[in-house]
Amino acid sequence: MKRVWIETYGCQMNVADTELMLGVLGREGYVAADVPEGADVLLVNTCAVRDNAEQRVIGRMGELQRHKHPGVILGVVGCMAQRLGPILLEQVPAVDLVVGPDGYRNLATLLGHAQAGQRVHDTEYRSWEHYEDVPQVREPGPTAFVTVQRGCDYRCTFCIVPTTRGPERSRVMAEVVREVELLAADGVTEVTLLGQTVNSYHDGTHDFADLLRAVGAVDGLRRLRFTSPYPTDFTPQVIEAMATTPAVCDHVHLPVQSGSNAILKRMLRRYSRERYLEVVAALREAIPGMTFSTDIIVGFPGETDADFADTLSLVEAAGFDDAYTFKYSVRDGTPAVKLKDHVPDDIASTRLTALVTAVRAQARRRNAQRVGEVHEALVERPARRGGMMLARTRRNHMVLLDVPAESIGEYHRVRLTGTTGSTFTGAVERPALAVL
């Protein structure tokens, strides 16, 4: 059997795509390698959202070259591969193969060409491709990602995703439900639905509200999450489905990007600051205790001190529990490249530091108020240190528990006993509620 090593960078969609590629290649006799040494194929599944992500990949390709000898194929797949295409073959002579997200079905054939000495690429868009007939190779465990939508039709000026992922298209609801049923039968109790703007899902007959209800009704599924939604695609029907489907978890990752209306307009985000806060309020009213995380960019072209102050004030007004924060990164191929008034890097860095400080202080304050609460928590994996296990609540809080490694997949009632600011310590209140 041939061995393939895949390194994954970027979002959950890339994680799911790596599982997909392992499924595609598994049908051709490939097996996943535990380490890059000795693998017959080395693939790097890439992100193109920010320049530093691409630079990391370029550096990593250089490191992987030491494992390359005659007969070993080195390839770049994913969003960076889609964005750069054959240019990557010119920039990195050791690379044999470049494949975008819509070309994975042909991966084994392309590897055959590469093994015959050709340097190949496939970055064609295929609007019909959902890989419905390809079983993903997932790590055993209680949770799983399920892709329900590929591509994006929004044209945010800072974003390269429409270029790297192509136009938006949704899977047929019945196929999604069938996949979740198979996962539940295999012991998965929590599923996260994936899409670039996942709540704009529509298969021509069913919308996202229908999908939530249908997936949430799958026998054996205890929890349902989704990411990443678009603020104004939270229709009253979707909010009602969230509130009335018991499996839907009490957490939403809701990217805002900026708290300034002027910057949101330049970003071509299709909502105002006020509308965003209305969506947050509507979700909190429908689902009391709902928690929120978000994405925020600082230093976007034209951002003034006043614009940044609006972002800081929105963090407080929205009551975020966590935020992924970034300095704006110029991406060739995006409309924002043409914008003027770029923010100097030192100013953007200062703003990022201030934003991170504000987000962490708010998270610490909100989490300190939660100490003493009792929540249901799913044991997911070992913690990095201390011999503890990490569990996750329905509200997406991570809790350190002193339970055996064999507890993965168990649900416990846990009391939150302390917090580091972002992570909680907890004590089990009751025996396991369910076992994987």
Image (cartoon, rainbow, N blue to C red):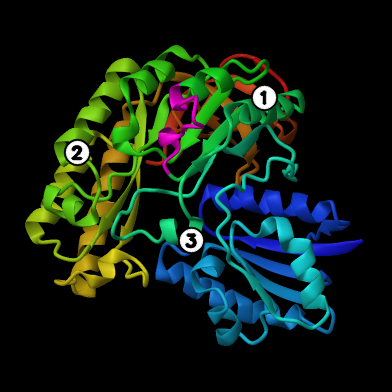
Dot 3 falls on a residue whose secondary structure is: helix
Q: Which mark is residue 316?
A: 2
- Give the residue drawn at x 63%, y 36%: 144
Was residue 401 drawn as part of the magenta stretch in this picture? no
Helix, strand or loop for disc 2: helix
Q: Amino acid at mark 2?
A: Glu
Pointers 2 and 3 in contact (C-beta within 8 Å): no
Report the side of 74 relative to 128 (left or right): right
Q: Nearer the viewer, mark 2 or mark 3?
A: 3
Please name the residue that numbered disc 1 is placed on.
Answer: 410
Relative to 206, does residue 313 appear above or below in the rendering?
A: below
Q: Position of residue 61 (x, y in %)?
A: 62, 77
- Dot 2 or dot 3, earlier in sequence: 3
Looking at the figure, which quarter contains the C terminus?
Answer: top right
Q: Which residues are magenta?
A: 197-209
Q: Quadrant of residue 77?
A: bottom right
Task: State the CA–CA distance, disc 2 to disc 1.
Answer: 35 Å
Instruction: Judge left or right: residue 269 versus residue 150.
Output: left
**Percent coordinates x, y for residue 364 in the rendering:** 32, 39
Q: Which mark is residue 295?
A: none
Work out whether mark 3 precedes mark 1 in sequence or the reverse, and give the earlier one: 3
Residue located at (27% from left, 50% from top)? 257
